[in-house]
Amino acid sequence: MDSIAVLDFGSQYAQLIARRVREARVYCELFQWDTETSKVLAIQPKGFILSGGPASVYAQGAPFIQDYILESGAPILGICYGMQALTQALGGRVDPSSEREFGPATVTPLPDTTLLPSTPFPVWMSHGDRLTQLAPGFSSLASSENSPHAAIGDASRKYYGVQFHPEVRHTPDGAEILRRFVIDICRTRTDWTPESIIEESVKRIRAQVDDGRVLAAVSGGVDSSVATALVHHAIGDQLVAMFVNTGLMRKDEPEQVTATLRKMLGPELVTVEAGEEFLRALAGVTDPEEKRRIVGEKFIRIFEKQARDLGQPGFLVQGTIYPDVVESSAPDRNKADRIKTHHNVGGLPKDMDFKLVEPLRYLFKDEVRAVGEALGLPEALIWRQPFPGPGLTVRCLGEVTPERVERLQAADAILTRELTEAGLIGKGAETSQAFVVLLPVRSVGVMGDVRTYQETAAIRAVVTDDFMTADWVRLPYELLGRVANRIVNEVNGINRVVYDITSKPPSTIEWE
């Protein structure tokens, strides 16, 4: 299988580059810029893409292009910082710019460029430095108002650079630019499909576990369910799946999930009722990172106990997907900041007894769903609303108590039902994810001429195709009014409803 290596120089959007390459049905992997050479070359890349980053190439200790990349003879595309690093490495010059570009801009290309559209096109800029001298062999391919070298190229060596960000949706032609580089310039085959993902995953799973027994942590969500089905497809009855009812799921969800999983896994599904145990562990805790740590550790301890009863399987399947990994990355100079710790990545205890099997670790949500469909999983399960691993702990801001969880479940059920009946959520609908957040914010209200002092519910609804960036959905006012009215009247303890209209970034999809 042909592949592309994406080198991350600290951009929050490096994973989106990989996402766009995979949209072109070409396999790629994302590596830190200073990853060991042998690990990068192990995938035999037919080209390299260098991401943006927060540093300046002329700063002391700034990330730089490793020698093996230039020595490989493979095509290179530098994006923003990546273009500047490529320029500096090959003898050009980069300096601070007196006129920075952050946000939308228009790029005017020169005629007959292999990489770019033939007419001016909108892009997303985010840079404070610019090229002041091209490296030998390069020529300018495009310009913008503040960037005389908005795109550069050396066709003889197949080296290219763009100052803008083609990976983000704010550059409408960006996906096509990346496709041209990957397919037309790197000459890769388009064989990254759900079927090939399954085939490669099966090989990796079998190589990792051999004849060992495997325990799957399955929540009923699309990620853990597809991961479990994929492992089951690979090793059959070596797998035992376990569903833990944490008491932190949506209203009536444990019963629905168990019924669906029973049909899929039959007697290989073990259920554990642990709601009281989780709520006791979370009592008095308000910090979201501590909540995630507690939930992650509690899950593992329950799995370890059950594993002993099942003959001590040595492997644990988790539905970790790529956004989980990216957002949990450890802070490091010149590398992406940690956004939040996902309970199944940074929240796991270091002394756990299992070796993790994570077949979806480098897949995006839509790729996971495509794999699920290829495996024949029920549509209702594949398109089930995404749900965070820590459950309602990260939607119940402040202390998690049985009363507040029940309050949140009731409000969320109202929103979900109204959206479903209106056809605004589910497969093919505009809304990718929607839920209610319970805030520890009380305000004065009046109901039946009686003063109330109760909590606030926030509605969150987003549209996204990769869950790395998202926009808020413009839900009809009539629907929002109906949902708010029902929540206030039907849910005890809530007297105010607000609607979250922030995108990701700057916000994340979940509130905690």
Image (cartoon, helix red, strand yellow):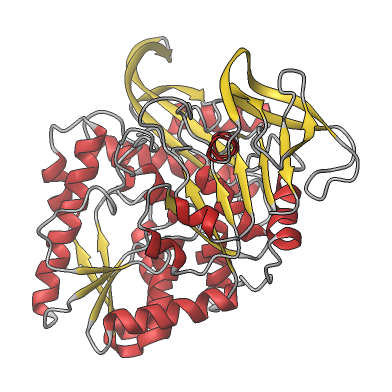
Q: Could you say which quadrant of the image residue 186 lies in? A: bottom right
Q: What is the x, y in percent for residue 434?
A: 52, 41
**In this image, 253 relative to 485: left or right?**
left
Q: How many marks?
A: 0
- Residue at 54 percent across and 71 percent down: it is 371
**Closest to the observer: 408 or 190?**
190
Q: What is the x, y in percent for residue 396?
A: 31, 35
- Residue at 38 percent across and 65 percent down: it is 38
Up-down: is 475 above or below 292? above
- Residue 71 visible: yes
**Closest to the observer: 230 or 59?**
59
Up-down: is 194 above or below 416? below
Q: What is the x, y in percent for residue 86?
A: 57, 41
**In this image, 271 relative to 494: left or right?**
left
**Closest to the observer: 414 or 155?**
155
Q: Quadrant of the C terminus?
A: top left
- Residue 220 visible: no
Q: Could you say which quadrant of the image residue 394 lies in? A: top left
Q: Could you say which quadrant of the image residue 195 lies in? A: bottom right
Q: What is the x, y in percent for residue 440?
A: 30, 23
- Residue at 30 percent across and 85 percent down: it is 267
**In this image, 274 relative to 465: left or right?**
left
- Residue at 58 percent across and 75 percent down: it is 1
Up-down: is 75 above or below 134? below
